[in-house]
Image (cartoon, rainbow, N blue to C red):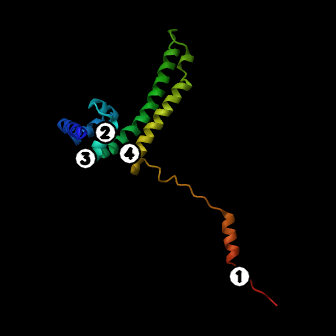
Amino acid sequence: MAGRSLQKERTAEIMRRGGPDFLLEWILSAKSLRSLAKDLDMSEGALRVLIMKNSELTAAVNEARREAADAYFDKSFELIENMSERRQREVFEALSGDGTRDASEANVSQIDLGIMKQEIGQNNLAASSWNQQRYGNKGNQQININIGDFHLDALRKTKVIDHE
């Protein structure tokens, strides 16, 4: 029974902070439910159960994720743009002639590219999961056609006419 009173306290704390609007703002600020659970001094699982049991909080989280999908999608473009700008800036500094930088320093490393690729992949995964209508991969269905099966079906359906 102690768990229920603690759950009520945590729900009251979320409602005191603004309830659904607070959760909406929390998630749109690119903060995770894990960080909210830590802030509320509870486990992430307990927080998720608490949210699922309250329809207003569930609706707020779902709405926030749909809206946050746009932010994650845009963030991928920003990562690419920032990497490109950084490279151009470093090349310009190397070519400026003051001798403080070497042109080879402007090369983007494979490690940087790998990290950026992972971040972009995660952002795109979040966007496609949280707003499937806009970012989902509905058009990527694979269709396999076996011509041999069509040929065998056609042979089975043919009529044999005997001529005497």
Between discs 2 and 1, the one toward the N terminus: 2
Mark-to-mark CA distance, 3 and 2: 13 Å
Asked whether the residues under the numbered discs 3 and 1 touch, taking CB atoms below 8 Å apart as contact, a structural biologist would say no
Give SS at disc 4.
helix
In screen coordinates, is 52 left or right of 102?
left
Residue 96: image location, x then y, percent? 50, 14
Between discs 3 and 1, the one toward the N terminus: 3
Between discs 4 and 3, the one toward the N terminus: 3
Numbered circle sitting on residue 84 = none
Between discs 4 and 2, the one toward the N terminus: 2
Instruction: Tell us which disc is closer to us: 2 or 1.
Output: 2
Q: Are there few (<14), some (14-19), or many (20+) residues within 10 Å of tag 1?
A: few
Residue 32 in view: no
State which quadrant residue 107 falls in: top right
Amino acid on which disc 3 is placed: Asn
In what quadrant of the picture does the N terminus appear? Answer: top left
Residue 104: image location, x then y, percent? 57, 17
Amino acid on which disc 4 is placed: Trp
In what quadrant of the picture does the C terminus appear? Answer: bottom right
Report the residue marked by disc 4. 130
Residue 69 in view: yes
Instruction: Tell us which disc is closer to us: 4 or 2.
Output: 2
Instruction: Tell us which disc is closer to us: 4 or 3.
Output: 3
Report the residue marked by disc 2. 46
Between discs 4 and 1, the one toward the N terminus: 4
Instruction: Tell us which disc is closer to us: 3 or 2.
Output: 2
Residue 35: image location, x then y, percent? 32, 31
Give SS at disc 2.
helix
Q: Which residue: 66% across, 68% down?
A: 150
